[in-house]
Amino acid sequence: MNRRDAIATLPGLLIVGSYPNLANAGFDIGGALNAAGDAAKAATLTDDQMRAYASQMAAYSDRQAKIAPPDSPYAKRLSGLTSSLTEDAGLRLNFKCYMTKEVNAFAMADGTIRLYSGLMDMMTDDELRYVVGHEMGHVKNGHTKKRMQTALAASAAQKGVAASGTRAATLADSQAGDLIVQVVRAQHSQGNEREADDYAMQFMSRRKYDRKACVTALEKLVKMSGGGASWLSTHPSPAERAERMRKQLA
């Protein structure tokens, strides 16, 4: 699979791949990370640096994807259902729809939210808002930042590079593409998924959306399991997550 194909099927909320071997990922952070330090310095990246790298990664991903044009039904629907979601807990959000049959979504630390048309086809507006809340839960609980730090630290350990200075340097396309694949493909733990679901429930509550959509969205994933979806072999059970969310409705 080439980088374009890998990005077209990036695992976010629904599809999760195994954690790749970063030593063989082709990282060359040279211009972005100073070679004078050690791996531990990767953990010192500030939130501003994380957001700057995420913005560059998102811009690269968008260039590789087929984005729904503004006058398309998908873009119009997405604009309507996110019209009141310009920010979340101080983080400005930006949305786009990728035109692909994949059932998927992902978020990045700069507030990037990308929903796939395959996901939009199978879910209601409130179910999609649950997806947004879940993805933001990964960002707000620090899961996304930790994965970035892990990827950079592993690269530093292998290549002798580390974070330095206060600014995020410009990433080459090859660097951005490799980081996207490594950071977004990293599998979330069961604990991370529960934390993201809890955040989604709170997100739905404070914005007065229908919280039952958290359950029905996951139930739709349960039905997908009957079709032999390969991603369900590595992703935490949607049935267990749906039951856990149902209990929170009581």
Image (tube, rainbow, N blue to C red):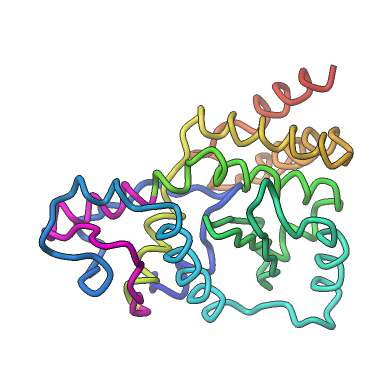
Task: Where is residue 199? Give x, y as percent.
Answer: 66, 35
Viewer-side residue, 36 vs 135: 36
**Figure quadrant of residue 158:** bottom left
Magenta stretch holds residue 156: yes
Residue that appears at 67% across and 60% down: 93
Viewer-side residue, 226 vs 209: 209
Residue that appears at 44% across and 43% down: 187
Q: In the drawing, does residue 96 fall left or right of residue 212?
A: left
Viewer-side residue, 240 vs 78: 78
Task: Where is residue 132? Give x, y as percent.
Answer: 70, 50
Residue that appears at 72% across and 62% down: 118
Task: Where is residue 103? Give x, y as percent.
Answer: 66, 56
**53 shown above or below 22:** below
**178 shown above or below 143:** below
Quarter of the image that includes the N terminus: bottom left
Magenta stretch holds residue 136: no
**178 shown above or below 237:** below
Q: Which residues are magenta?
A: 148-173
**7 shown above or below 85:** below
**Figure quadrant of residue 225:** top right
Quarter of the image that includes the C terminus: top right
Viewer-side residue, 78 vs 123: 78
